[in-house]
Every structure is written in C-alpha cells, then in structure tokens.
Image: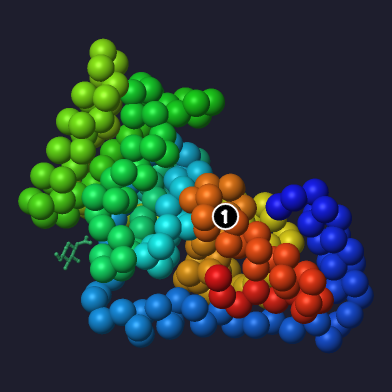
Amino acid sequence: MKLTASVLLVTVIISWAASPALSIRFPDRISGNVNALSEQPLRTAVFALGSFWRSEAAFGCLDGVVRTAAGYSGGSRPNPEYRSLGDHAECVQIEYNPRIISFRELLDVFWTSHDSRQVFGQGPDVGNQYRSIIFTNGTEETRSAALSKEREQTRSKTSVVTTQIQQLGTFYPAEPEHQKFELKRNPFLLQLIGNLPEEELEQSTLATKLNGYAAELCPPRMQRQIDAKIDDIIRKGWPILREI
Ligand SMILES: *[C@@H]1O[C@H](CO)[C@@H](O)[C@H](O)[C@H]1NC(C)=O
C-alpha cells in the first residue's frame, strides 16, 4: 500500500472502531463458491522451501490456488510441533484447481521463491527444517519434478541444487499461530475481511490471497488489483472486502 493510502487507512480504522454498526462480521463465502464452480476436483501439492510463513504467502496469491496451509512433512516423527519437529521440514500444502494452474506452474513458483542451492537453511533461517523438498504423488509428478530440477541445475551451473524429491507422505498442519502468519501481522487486512474466526480464516480463499498480498509476494498484476480494490473500498467508506 502506498503512503497516502496508509494515512487514509488509519482514519478509516479509527472511524470504523468508533462505530459499532460497522463491526458486523461478514462470513467469507469465496472458498465455497470456488469449489462449487469447478467441476474438476482440487488437487494437493506440498513443498518445503524454507520458513513456512513465507512459503504459504508465496503460493497464496496465484490464480487457481484455493487454499494453503503451513505444516510439517518429510520426516518420521509422529505429531511434530514447532518446538519439536524432529526430522520434518517446514512445508506449505497447496490446494489448487488443475484447470487453472498446473503442477508444473507451481514448480516454477517453487524454484523462484527460494534458493535451492543453499545448504542447511534459507537466508537467516538455519537448520534442517528449512531444507528444500518437492513432494510428489504418482509417476507423472515425479517425472515433472525431476525434469524441473535438471533444468534448475543447468541454470545454476557449478553450485549444486540441494532439492530433494520425495514421495508425498503425511502432512501435519502446524499450530494455528503459524497459519496465515503474514496476514495476521496486518490487523487492517484482518479487519477488512471481517475478523474471521481461526477456522474460517484457515479455509478462506480470500485470506489465502491476502496472506500473499500482506507479504508482498503476489504477482505484480494481482498485487495492483488488490491495491485498487482496497483503495476503492476506502473511497466508498464501507470497509469490507468480500472478494478479489
Ligand atoms: C494422490 O493423487 C490421487 C489422484 O491421482 C488422489 O486420489 C490422492 O488423494 C492423492 N494423495 C494425496 C496424499 O494427496
């Protein structure tokens, strides 16, 4: 959001908070609509690419992504938790509509959203839990993953791409405080969609998109589209966002 918008936002929040009539909670119906409209069943992909806060945001804004969740996978410890995740990696689980976005397109975003050549961490995050993994379900996905890894290795020349390709196993959702982490850091955006309770927030396609927006990880076109929507809402003085 631009600076002028931010000043406006503060004004809106103040007048909004002062008016109980405006604090009605609007349920988010977006995720339901998306499911109903698509005849194709949704598919699930899981990737590990560093901190799951950022990973969730990196995929949330893409057209065709319906829902994301942060969690743990790739290890053997039963019921991992944030402070004791054992040999698991931090992961993002992505539910997507394969008619709108393909597994290969998700792989492209996977490669551009982290540095697969870093060993034992990503940027400031150091540790085995930040390793890079593509989880695959079936031979076709395994083939796509292997091909895309080869391409990435060719691009990175001398440094070794450390990404592992593993069969998709159990995905353990992370604790609520790690879900939609970027969005939760932005009280204005949370207000904007009606302060959904945790369960609705985790299922909401709108919250999934705004989580990417909050981290400024949406594709530029989508980032601009959401900026415009928010500007429009502020102008109209009815600060509720129901869809993008
Ligand atoms: C793997 O894919 C099949 C369909 O190809 C699907 O039925 C199954 O649920 C998938 N498994 C997981 C763990 O997502």
Q: Is residue 239 above or below residue 115?
A: below
Which image quarter holds the C terminus?
bottom right
Q: Residue at x 42, y 27 (%)?
A: 121
Mark 1 lies on residue? 223
Q: Residue at x 65, y 74 (%)?
A: 241
Which quarter of the figure has residue 99? bottom left
User: Residue 95: x and y, percent?
Assistant: 34, 64
User: Residue 223: x and y, percent?
Assistant: 57, 55
The three-letter code of the residue at mark 1 reads Gln
Instruction: Say whether residue 60 is left or right of residue 128.
Output: right
* Residue in front for this viewpoint, 65 or 53: 65
Asked if residue 7 can be seen in this view, the reply is yes
Q: Is residue 222 above or below residue 72?
A: below
User: Residue 18: x and y, percent?
Assistant: 91, 75
User: Residue 47: x and y, percent?
Assistant: 32, 46
Q: Residue at x 85, y 61 (%)?
A: 8
Q: Residue at x 41, y 62 (%)?
A: 63
Which quarter of the figure has residue 117? top left
Instruction: Say whether residue 136 is left or right of residue 199.
Output: left
Asked if residue 177 can be seen in this view, the reply is no
Q: Quadrant of ligand 1?
A: bottom left
